[in-house]
Image (cartoon, helix red, strand yellow):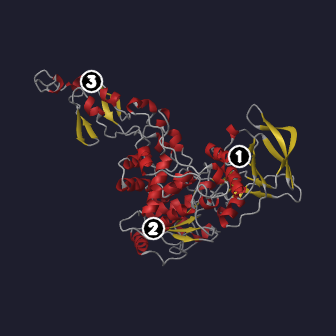
Amino acid sequence: MDKPFAITLDPGSSRANHTGAWRTERPVYGSFLPPCNNACPAGENIQQWLYDAEEGGAEAYQAAWRQIMADNPFPAVMGRVCYRPCETACNRAQLDTAVGINSVERFLGDQAVAQGWQLYPGGTTPRTPRCAPGNETPVAAALTREAGRGGGREVLVVGAGPSGLAAAYHLTRLGHAVTVRDAGSQPGGMMRYGIPRYRLARDILDAEIDRILALGVTLELNTTVTGILDVLTEQAGGHAAPGEGFDAAFIAVGAHIGKRAYIPAGDSAKIMDAVALLHRVEDGTAPMLGRRVAVYGGGNTAMDAARTARRLGAAEAVVVYRRTRDRMPAHDIEVTEALEEGVTMRWLSTVAHAEAGSLTIEKMRLDDSGFPQPTGEFEELSADCLVLALGQDADLAVLDGVPGVTFSGGTVDVGPDLMTGHPGIFAGGDMVPAERTVTVAVGHGKQAARAIDAWLRQASAEAPPRRALAGYDSLNPWYYADAPAAVRPKLDAARRAGTFDEVTGGLNGSTALFEARRCLSCGNCFGCDNCYGSCPDNAIVKLDAGHYVIDYDYCKGCGICAAECPCGAIAMVPEES
């Protein structure tokens, strides 16, 4: 039987006559930026670790976990508390539902904790926080010595929250010796003292913090840092003598001070702030709130305070908010779960006066710009306690009087590299202008670590140019079968009020694998062979699984390969003249 014309070498055939000379455009394999990667504040290579996890099994899952750990040392924490901007950006949401990226991340993080996966061959043994050198594990001590031999420097991190611990993690892996100082009695910052246990189990938090400390990070708790310049070496413009201080500092003290508002109140009115409430619950000194609790505010902290009040025994918990639900800063999932647990909402309301056992509420209306205006209509609301959840401020005292450091709107002014106006002093997390989430804070920690490393080496910390974004329009969605996301199990609403057990469960091995395989691999080849099989001139050469090159001697530029690529990894570009 004769071979098809396109793949013979007979005179006059396409292969013999190098038909590539006919084309006006050529196909080029690209490497586009997936929208999930682009949206992740922690800068994770989400598409890559989902691709690693798609193989299934312990080895593949561990490879995926290691890919996450290159950017984020808290996958199990993030899998619980991140508000999933990656899923909001996911192209698959336009096909059926977004890939459950956060669910897979939690699964991988939990596997790492359960299986004891370690970052380095031989592993390290998690240990309790230390306050001075000398009690490291052998591996951690060896890593610290190796950092010194490799030209590592001494870096101080102030604040053991998500940003400070992430910075310590990345700086240690870059070869520096890091000391973390925190005023609290336990590490974790707002992960521990701001996020209730029903959202983040403490054994998970402790396990991921221990993994960071096991690298050789020194943790000094119950330590308030004052006079930051006094601990910096002269090289960084500080006062300490060379060899006796730190070469750079990263300040990430978080926002632990609850904002107050003037509310006329009687002497017997019971008023407290939400930050203090959540902190006391974590410390085991939860206050008596009474049967009826009102929470004033509309953010995530207000939802946490109301839901916590229900768990502390309040029969009624009501959130008083000046605007409507669609203008509420709290994430929708927080509001939904609060409503499921019996928390009620008083929209378009403000607290005008507080007395023992009751509040005077004024009704509000929104003007044309959406700003709440008083109506002069009042009503009484029974409440044994008023909890103020009006936002938080950062304690900036650690930077008072530091030359060159400036402040705006209760935050520290920093450059693109997160360095303040004083050389060698960097800041991040909740104390700089940015969205206040754990994910953003972790991203700041990584960014600051790389900037500090570059500054200490007197090198450039410029980020590589951003790749073009892989949009939904570049995909061929009909290649992908409908496969709605797996649903994570939830504790029944009726059982939540009396317990701080985690509300949302995780995926199992089967559902996690299914979810990872829902990724569309937007903008990047995943080796489906569509281009290889559809080329009419056999101009695409398959090197091995998932790797191809185009033989432009025979490619006519017909564009079939680009049209048939499911993930939009092939672009047609004008032929060079």
How far separated are the C-alphas under marks 1 and 2? 40 Å
Can you give x and y, in whole percent of width and height, for residue 43 in the image?
48, 49
Q: Secondary structure at mark 3?
A: loop
Query: Of circles 1 and 2, which is in front?
Result: 1
Can you give x and y, in whole percent of width and height, for residue 410 in the image?
69, 53
- Per the image, the residue denoted by label 1 is 298
Can you give x and y, in whole percent of width and height, for residue 165 in the image?
53, 62
Marks 1 and 2 in Cβ contact (< 8 Å): no
- Per the image, the residue denoted by label 2 is 215
Q: Amino acid at mark 2?
A: Leu
Q: Nearer the viewer, residue 189 or 280?
A: 280
Q: Residue furthest top?
A: 12
Q: Amino acid at mark 1?
A: Gly
Q: Secondary structure at mark 2?
A: loop
How far separated are the C-alphas under marks 2 and 3? 56 Å
Q: Earlier in the sequence, mark 1 or mark 2?
A: 2
- Per the image, the residue denoted by label 3 is 23
Q: Nearer the viewer, residue 433 or 187?
A: 187
